[in-house]
Amino acid sequence: MAPRISYVDPATMKDQAMLDELDRCRREGTPRPESQAIRAHVPKAFWSFANTWRDVFHTGVADHNIKELCRLYVSRSVLCEFCGNQRSIKAGKAGAVEADYLDLINFETSTRYDDRQKAALAYAECITWDLPSTDALWARLHKHFTEPELVEIGYFIAITMGQQRWLRTLDIEHHQILAGTDGSMAPGFEDMDALKHSKADPSYWAKKKPTPSSSAA
C-alpha cells in the first residue's frame, strides 16, 4: 500500500544536513527514515521534529527509559504500528529488555513496573485517554518526579501522542526508505519479511483494541 502522503526520495534531496539526518535515522532509528521522509516535504517540520526528538527524547532532564515506556504506551493506546514496532537503542543499552513492553496497557496491575514507572505511565494514560486530572494523580507524580521532569515527560507524551495519531493515518511502513538496516526495529521486525510474518501472527499486539488500565488515580 502506498502512503497517503508521498515519501520525499532522498535521491532528490539537495540539503546535505537533511541527508545526514536521514542516514542517522537509518542507523539509529527513533525516528526511522520513513516518517522523516514524509516530514521532509516541509523542511521546517522535518527539523522541528528532529530537534525535539534529540533534545526532549534522546537527551533532557528525565530518565530516557521512562520516556521510552511512555512512548510505547502511547503506541499501544492509539494503535500506531509504525511507532510501536520501534525500540530505542539508547534504552536497550541502558538495560531495557523486550519484556518491559509486554504489559504496558495493564501497567497498574502488572508486576513488571516499579512505583515510579507506574506513576509515569499513569501520566501517559491520563493524557492519552483524556482521563480526569485528579489530586491523587498529581500527588503520585510529585512523589516521584521533579517539576522539570514532569514538564519534560508531559511535553514528550503530548508530542509523541500527536505525532503517532497523525502517522497512523498515513499508512507508512518500515523498510521502504533507506532500507537495509534494522536500527531501532523491535525483535521480529528487522526486515520486511520478518515484519510481515510478525504482523500475521494472531498474537500480534495491534490486533487487540486497548482500553485504559485505570482512572489514572
Image (cartoon, rainbow, N blue to C red):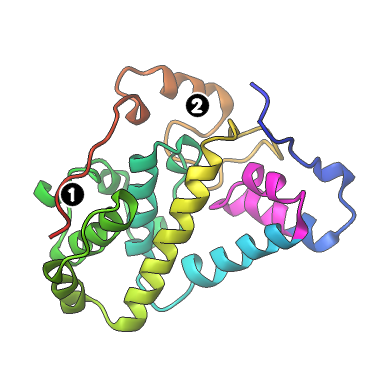
Residue at the spot x=84%, y=60% of the render? 16
Left or right of 161, for residue 29: right
Residue 35: give x, y in percent of width and height: 63, 45
Camera-side residue of 136 and 171: 136
**Numbered disc in front, either 1 or 2:** 1
Q: Quadrant of the N terminus?
A: top right
Q: CA distance from mark 1 to mark 2?
A: 26 Å
Q: Judge whether residue 128 is colored magenta.
A: no
Asked if residue 140 is positioned above or below residue 129 in the image, the reply reads below
Q: Quadrant of residue 84?
A: top left
Q: Which residues are magenta?
A: 21-43
Left or right of 64, for residue 55: right
Residue 181: give x, y in percent of width and height: 62, 40
Residue at the spot x=60%, y=47% of the render? 32
Asked if residue 74 is positioned above or below residue 136 in the image, the reply reads above
Q: How many marks?
A: 2
Q: Which secondary structure dominates the residues rendered in magenta?
A: helix
Tag 1: Cα neighbours inside 10 Å, few (<14), some, or many (≥20)?
many
What amino acid is at disc 1? Phe
Residue 167: give x, y in percent of width and height: 55, 41
Camera-side residue of 100 and 79: 79
Which disc number belongs to residue 195? 2
Q: Is residue 88 visible?
A: no
Which disc number belongs to residue 107? 1
Q: Quadrant of the C terminus?
A: bottom left
Residue at the spot x=69%, y=58% of the render? 45
What amino acid is at disc 2? Leu
